[in-house]
Amino acid sequence: MARIELESLQKEFGETVAVNDISLSVPDGEFLVLVGPSGCGKSTLLRTISGLESQTSGDISIGDNRVTNVEPKDRGVAMVFQDYALYPHMTARRNMTFGLDSHVSMSDDEIEQAVQDVGETLGIGDLLDRTPDALSGGEKQRVAMGRALLREPDVFLLDEPLSNLDAKLRDQMRAELTQLHERIGTTTIYVTHDQTEAMTLGDRVAVMNDGEIEQVESPQVLYDEPASRFVAEFIGSPQMNFLPVDVEGRSRPTVTTLQRHLTSPFPTPNETSLPATDNAVLGVRPEDLYLAQETEDDSFAGPVEMTVTLHETLGDSVVLHGTVANERIRIRTSQRPNVTAGDTIRVVVDPTRLHLFDSDGDTLAHAAEKMVQTV
Amino acid sequence: MPDVSIVPDTVNERLLTTTGDSQLATHAALWLIISVLILPIALAAVYSTQTTNAVYQITNVFPGSALVENYTTVLFEYNFGQYMWNSFVMATVVIVGKLVFSLLAATALVYYDFRFQSLIFYAILFTLLMPLPVRIVPLYQLMADIGWLNSFAGLTSPFIASATAVFLFRQQFRSIPASVVETAKLDGIGPIQFLINVLIPMSKGMIAGVTAIMFISTWNAYLWPLVAIIDRTNQVAQVGLRYIQGTGAEGFVQWNLVMAAGILVLIPPLIVLLVARRYLLSTLGGGE
Amino acid sequence: MTEQHSRLQVFTSNWQAAALLLPTLALIAVFLYYPFLETVQLSFYQLRVLGSGEWVGLQNYVQLFESGAYRNSLVVTVLFTAATVTASLFLSLIISFLIHEANRFTNLYLVAAIWPYAMPIAVAGIVLDFLINPRIGVVTWAIEVLTGFQFAWQTNGALALVAVIIAAVWQGLGYSIIFMTAAFNQVPDSITDAAKLDGIGRFQRLFRIYVPLISPVLVFLIVIQTIGAFFGGFALIDLMTSGGPSNATNVLMFNLYQDAFLNQRFGYASAQSIVLFGFVAVLMYVQLRVTDRYAYYGGA
């Protein structure tokens, strides 16, 4: 059993609060991703859980044990670092076994066998007698993971392990990490600044900002129902469009934006009402905007005229940057429109994909929709 | 040499003339300078093979016939065998002592956190202002009082604590990535095991460089052995030179033997320099 | 203490830290601090025999200031130091520059240029003692034959100083060259290329471009070599001139040795030690301030 409980965890460095009163439950076997911009405290939080940093206040439990003041080596954690942290003068094999004694008690033969097994699992069985300078980045990262695996920890802690690898390798290792997790099932906390990585890897993703967790949910829920403007901005690429908006009407609200060029219904869940305001922000993702010509769905609001300023080809889709009524908009479409800067296109919106935020960045409402059920 | 084919001709001309013929001058100058630097020692080596008669003939700069004879005389009759042995023992004791003590101290200064840590480090550094001449009188008195004059203990102990070594090792340790250190901490590895299995192997270059530098400076030490050693048989090779230069009847020094002694005394540090030059250069020059 | 450095502090036991530091601190206390403080104390005493003497306050220092012999030593030392450091640094600069410019054999040249670093100063002394011996030295003979000049340094004070300076420079070049070649290597190739493309001549390049770029190392060497020259001349003087003729090469260090161990004037010698300490302290302080300044301006 290795669930993790964080109770009111606080970590301060002098005047700076790096981790601000965080409480979190991680069920046994979950792959939790901590994501956020640089300086948000995700690495500090990870290091506090590991015991490398000691908390200012609060408690940590791993499994049934309260580990708040326990030495790192006795917490049942294993950690993988961004720069692999391999001893340059030792072979891969020795790197993995050095320091093993304090974690598991195995005979030398058992250790030999275990190293071989882990090596095979990670695809580095032939490389075990090489030193780090004879290994590529990906191979070094696997050795680092092998070292963690050998310790049979209750919890894996991974601190941006893929950030030093090139893009293709990163994709490959991401898939391998997921497979590994499905096979072994150890509770894992994974830190990254890359939201794509977070979304693809995590059972749940915790979005952090300024020492606090803004939202922790499954990736799909984060995407569909961001709890704050920060989360909405951080998750999803290209970034969500934010427009100043007037909200009118009670039980059947409508929103008006873009200097009255666009008015749209805002279907609310269970038809709850929204307060009328002229101080709110409308959020709509680029992929929820469509070219007028590509859809016949007349429930869509608009069209509005957009002057294109930039055409980006992604291969499977196209992102068009442009302006409507002095607001900058991005639209992402799977069509291949033959437009360039200066052209005008007509854009419509799916009202069931709208989000509303107040001026402080808190979420007011998400438009009701046929949501994809999280399994 | 830049790829001259892609560069316009006028520039080519200038590059070629500034780099082409000046290389000749550079090499010529260097050969000249190096010859001047080596000449005295080369002459000394030649003289060390001459008989005493030959060495007194000013214009005789040709190798002589007394090579073996001179060196055996110096080694045995003039006791340089004994002196050089003493120097070796002294150097070994000092080096081992310095390495062990400084490595331990640097470990404490980098991997621990305790009150007065900075103060202690500066207290160690401050000793750089206390070179031998500044403490020699009381040091002599101290040795006399505890009966360490004329002994290896007295000869070596003033040199074993080294601020420079502590400083260099501390810097070296600080350059080891924090994640490597934290990995060891996560495994609960103790400080001595960490020092022996991780720090020292990762600092081999600097340890070699520091050892080479220490050997050379300890071997070449003159003033303290002169003062602290009383019996000639316990003396080190450097001061032995003083003895052999003073021998011979009034005005009649056997220079061929003196030169042989000088060559003998030069050889060990020279070998150390040649063998360990890469490490020495990177330690002094700062990582190259 | 940067964040990186505090991450390194993974061990917590204070007594372990104490145990690790104890050997070094003990040795430092006994063989460095204690003698140093004793020197200070002794300098206020007049001693004939070790262990018993009378307090004389600042009398030793006053005697030093009034002593013609001491002032002579001061002058000799300053001359010796200035000449040695200037010549040594200038020559090392040229040699290091030439090595940097050479396109081949650089390793060979480097080793051939720095070997004097390994040479014991005593060896330098006795070798030159013979080679420039006024009666039978081949170098003095050659000079006399070629120029008619008699290099009578055993009787002529100024020439004695020159002889000692030559020996010191010869031995000290290695150390400076090591540091300077390292500094030259850190100058980006692109700067050299740009200068060559502009047709800037060799020595212009050296003095206008390289010297400013490697100036922190130059300053460091000036300080270190100066401190070294204050102390390091001892073996040379002892072997070649014994301070003479007529005290012409009686540097401070040699004077101290004589007063302490030949004349048994321990208190007086201790005062001289303290004065030397003063010089070193000032020089080290200068070095610290100057490198600080260069650090701010991003020196090499």
Image (cartoon, rainbow, N blue to C red):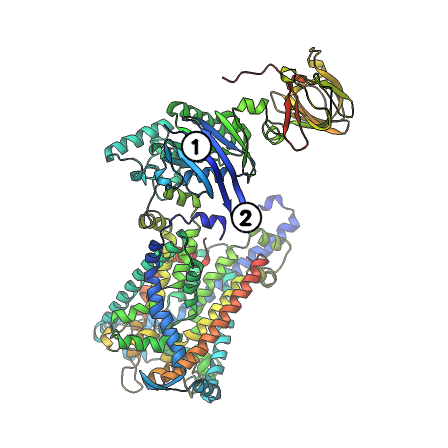
Are discs 2 and 1 both within one chain?
yes
Q: Front-most of B5 and A138?
A: A138
- Disc 2 crowd rating (10 Å Cα; few below 14, some 14-19, many 20+) is few
Q: Quadrant of residue C289?
A: bottom right
Type of the residue with mark 2:
Glu
The x and y percentages for residue A102 are: 30, 39
Q: Looking at the image, is mark 2 or mark 1 earlier in the sequence?
A: 1
The x and y percentages for residue C293 are: 57, 62
Q: Front-most of A129 and C146?
A: A129
Q: Residue furthest left?
A: B76
**Which residue does the numbered mark 1 point to in the structure image?**
A5
- Asked which secondary structure carries label 2, the reply is loop
Type of the residue with mark 1:
Glu
Q: Residue at x 24, y 35 (%)?
A: A108
Q: Residue at x 42, y 81 (%)?
A: C271
Give the chain letter at badge 1. A
**C217 is higher (above) or lower (below) than A372:** below
Q: Residue at x 36, y 50 (%)?
A: B199
* Mark 2 to mark 1 CA distance (whole Å): 26 Å
The x and y percentages for residue C16 are: 33, 54
> Which label is found at residue C221?
none
Q: Front-most of B53 and A49?
A: A49
In this picture, residue C106 sits left or right of residue A300:
left
**Which residue does the numbered mark 2 point to in the structure image?**
A15
- Disc 1 crowd rating (10 Å Cα; few below 14, some 14-19, many 20+) is many
The x and y percentages for residue C83 are: 50, 75
**C100 is higher (above) or lower (below) than A121:** below
Give the chain letter at badge 2. A
- Asked which secondary structure carries label 1, the reply is strand
In this picture, residue B49 sits left or right of residue B40:
left
